[in-house]
Image (spheres, rainbow, N blue to C red):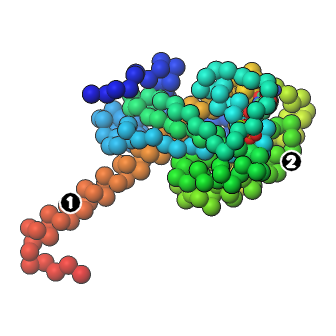
Amino acid sequence: MSVLPPVRKDRIIGQLPKCFSKGAALNTEDEFHSKVKTACQQQRTGTVGFKISKVIVVGDLAVGKTCLINRFCKDVFDKNYKATIGVDFEMERFEVLGVPFSLQLWDTAGQERFKCIASTYYRGAQAVIIVFDLTDVASLEHTRQWLEDAMKENDPTSVLLFLVGTKKDLSSPAQYTLIEQDAIKLADQMKAEYWALSALSGENVREFFFRVASLTFETNVLAELEKSGSRRIGEVIRKYIKDHPKMKVC
Ligand SMILES: Nc1nc2c(ncn2[C@@H]2O[C@H](COP(=O)(O)OP(=O)(O)OP(=O)(O)O)[C@@H](O)[C@H]2O)c(=O)[nH]1
Ligand SMILES: [Mg+2]
């Protein structure tokens, strides 16, 4: 019996959300992977529905990490800056292709003096969101360092990366075009997906988190299918050896 309330109606994902820019996307497909769709239809997603995926949000102080999470999770925006001390986290429950799926969003401190505490929470992330301020070029330059720090604690081959520019409402079209060119180039080098959004207006916030949830879910299901596939091959080999006791195994 489940003790959890049903997933909110506005957290139900039935289709793969689109990327923000094809120039820097983790995947440019229009739909979920066919293997993932079939596994979900046949309810063969293993433990994915019970798992909680860890997502860490890093970046310079005051770039808008907390506001971004609060806009999505609570639909609020605070114009007063209150520095995050250490870390904070929010849970978000989704339903993707009919399967429950949860994200634990870790909001970390950007201030140098709290960085040491925050970095102890980086381990075990399935997705890393590196945030910069679209009106502050230095914050974009610092994203390389944030990536390096986050990757010290994680396996770079299995983590999904997102490079996110915030405060889009504050940047003029000319300023935005300039910084976007650099951000897309950097995202491409980092193998990250690029997004630009505003926690104040809410522009692209929901679309972005739906994309994070969908891609993390898809990766989890594919990994689960691979695991069960190799288990099945192991079973076939064991059965073959049992049925052919005279066969030598090297
Ligand atoms: N105009 C505008 N202001 C924003 C936006 N997002 C955040 N801010 C403002 O930027 C300031 C910093 O936001 P926070 O979300 O607290 O920044 P943070 O990255 O969490 O900072 P640390 O916790 O110190 O690392 C606050 O005054 C916010 O109101 C946005 O999208 N637009
Ligand atoms: Mg904060």
The quarter in which the C terminus is drawn is bottom left
With respect to residue 5, does 123 lie above or below? Answer: below
Residue shown at 15% from the left, 66% from the top: 240
Number of residue marks: 2
The quarter in which the N terminus is drawn is top left
Left or right of 153 in this view: 6: left
The circle on residue 138 is: 2
| Along the viewing direction, whichever of 127 and 69 lies nearer the viewer | 69
Residue shown at 65% from the left, 49% from the top: 118
Where is residue 63 shown, x and y percent of the image?
78, 38
The quadrant where ligand 1 appears is top right
On the question of residue 238 being in view, the answer is: yes
Return the disc, 2 or 1, that comes first in the chain's sequence: 2
Q: What secondary structure is marked by label 2? A: helix
Where is residue 145 shown, x and y percent of the image?
75, 56
| Cβ atoms under marks 2 and 1 closer than 8 Å | no
- Residue designated by label 1: 235
2 vs 1, front mark: 2
Amino acid marked by disc 2: Ala
Residue shown at 30% from the left, 35% from the top: 43
Q: Residues within 10 Å of mark 2 (few under 14, many from 20)?
A: few
Most distant residue in the top direction: 9
Q: What secondary structure is marked by label 1? A: helix
Q: Quadrant of residue 72?
A: top right
On the question of residue 186 being in view, the answer is: no
Left or right of 214 in this view: 57: right
Q: Residues within 10 Å of mark 1 (few under 14, many from 20)?
A: few
Where is residue 124 shown, x and y percent of the image?
52, 52
